[in-house]
Amino acid sequence: MSDTTTNPARRRFLVDAARTASGVALLGLGVGLYSRQAASLPSQAIRPPGALAEDSFTGACIRCGLCVRDCPYDTLSLATLGDGVATGTPYFVARDVPCEMCEDIPCVKACPTGALDPALTDIDDARMGLAVLIDEENCLNFQGLRCDVCYRICPSINKAITLERQHNERSGKHAVFIPTVHSSDCTGCGKCEKACVLEEAAIKVLPMHLAKGELGGHYRWGWKEKQKAGGSLVAPDQQHQYNLPQGQRYDYEGDGLIFEQDGGAVPFDEDPLSTLNKGLEAQP
Amino acid sequence: MKRRQRPGAQAVAERGWLSAHKWLLARRFSQLAILALFLAGPWFGIWIVKGNLVSSVTLDVLPLTDPYVLLQSLLARHAPEAAAVTGALIVLAFYLLVSGRTYCAWVCPVNIVTDSAHWLRERLNITGASRLSRNTRYWLLGATLLLALITGTLAWELVNPVTMLQRGLIFGMGLGWTLVLAVFLLDLLVARRAWCGHLCPVGAFYSLLGTHGLVRVRADNRRQCDDCMDCFMVCPEQQVIRPALKGADKGIGPVITSPNCTNCGRCIDVCAKQVFTFGGRFNNRCTDSTQPGAPADARAPANHSPGMEVLR
């Protein structure tokens, strides 16, 4: 009735509760939206070895800094407000201080929550990111110089980065040695980026999702499938036929052109006429 | 109107400055000593405690983890390793035993910020306040936990001024000082004890651990109370004092049982009559009740003393 609807105590309680709830909800909305924005890790910020995927990591890392403390090279630091990295989480910038890839991985051992996955026991299995030779125009090796610094400094030398020899088109007579990163061995430690002699590094460690493409799930490499199946999957292979002169054949297994050593070996008769008449003899 | 003395002035006059600031000094020592333990490593290479207040390792053996942050992580659907769980259980057990909000007064460095803001607020005589409910902190606590559940990240820890100050002092502040300044200004200008007493979800979480805590402030000498109001003036959670101090006639025991009492001990310091002491939770029987209708006391009845109205 009228006296219940205007009950001032009840009214005040309801208004107060609504005020508090909406204030808290607004704050929550703001923080929630900010958290989505903060989930995008800047590409120069690299997580320590063994870090879970970024969306799991920000839920697992409690921002204690024990990994920072146990890093013997002071590589890691905790993000502060304004860094663009989720506040309080550990990261490093390879160009400043790269990961030295300690064999005992003290940062992972220090992590109390498993945000740095304790299953990582061999530092070579770490995938902090992937080095990418990002600027072929300024990389000295691409110009034919033998800088090779990224190749030399790499802890997995000749595995994570190899030098691939190519013809030097500019000079026309030399070779260029192209530093080539292999994701099978690159841990993303960033020593190459740190060591690059350029003013701005030509080789950079990028987060995996930026550094690597991915095939569509349905895509198959034909030759791999063929090898797996032990033969063509579509139709029986037609062996290619070369029109070779008499006494020659082609070996498809790799020997190439073979001169058969049978009889005279010379495909032509002494008498040129008989060559011209060849094939006509059978006709009536 | 009589000009009000600064709270504690009489206690200082009667017992001396040191005795009237005993618990305050002890708390500041505790707060700073804990920070010093964390900073001795990075500053002087003396590694006693590593990490920060969210999670630490003491002398390479004792793990301690903030159960509130770990709870957020659990709600973000991460199963933590044993070290964090062990650390959180130790902290939980400690604060269940000692009373959760002891953390607020004796450990958390934000307390120094908000106490300073309060001191300045009193000095500048800033009164009047926006009406904030003391229950807002529980709403906020719920919201922070809900956020972790929804976003799958420790969303609140991105902006939590408490962990930000703790971590910032030990690992570097960045722009985190802006949030600490915001808390300071909030307490200075917006409302009395706005952050620690009304909003902080960390304190709200720890208060939930304090419902059965054993270490409590007791008003065993409450018959001595002369209604000088000094304890109310200094108390960061004023609502907790009244039942114990003035409840004799209602049959309420002398122990301050509210889980929101931070065990800061300022009431003990400033009371010239030495009404308060630290003590246990037990033996909370009301033995000093005056009979209703007993000969009129010189003092006003407990729940109608004029000072009380001011605090409404």
Image: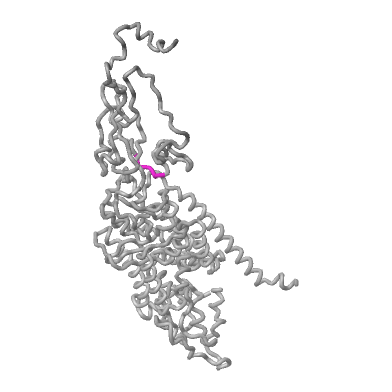
Q: Residue at x 27, y 16 (%)?
A: A264
- Residue A273 spot, x, y in % from top left: 35, 6
Q: Residue at x 38, y 64 (%)?
A: B109
Say whether residue B50 is left or right of residue B152. Answer: left
**Colour style of the rendered protein structure:** one colour
- In the rendered image, the residue lying farthest to the right is A1
Q: Nearer the viewer, residue A49 or A247?
A: A247
Is residue A186 at all visible to an observer of this figure? yes
- Residue B226 spot, x, y in % from top left: 48, 83
Query: Compared to A130, does A275 lie above or below?
Result: above
- Tell whether position B281 is magenta: no
- Tell whether position A206 is magenta: yes
Quarter of the figure with the N terminus of chain A? bottom right
Task: Choose top left, top right, bottom left or bottom right for residue B89.
Answer: bottom left
- Residue A64 spot, x, y in % from top left: 36, 60
Q: Which residues are magenta?
A: A204-208
Is residue B127 at all visible to an observer of this figure? no
- In the rendered image, the residue lying farthest to the front is A284
Count the numbered circles shown: 0
Q: Nearer the viewer, residue A60 or B8?
A: A60
- Residue A163 spot, x, y in % from top left: 28, 34
Quarter of the figure with the C terminus of chain A? top left
Tell me which secondary structure the magenta stretch mostly adopts.
strand
Q: Nearer the viewer, residue A241 or B80?
A: A241
Q: Residue at x 34, y 46 (%)?
A: A93
Query: Compared to A9, does A129 lie above or below?
Result: above
Query: Compared to B278, does B138 lie above or below?
Result: above
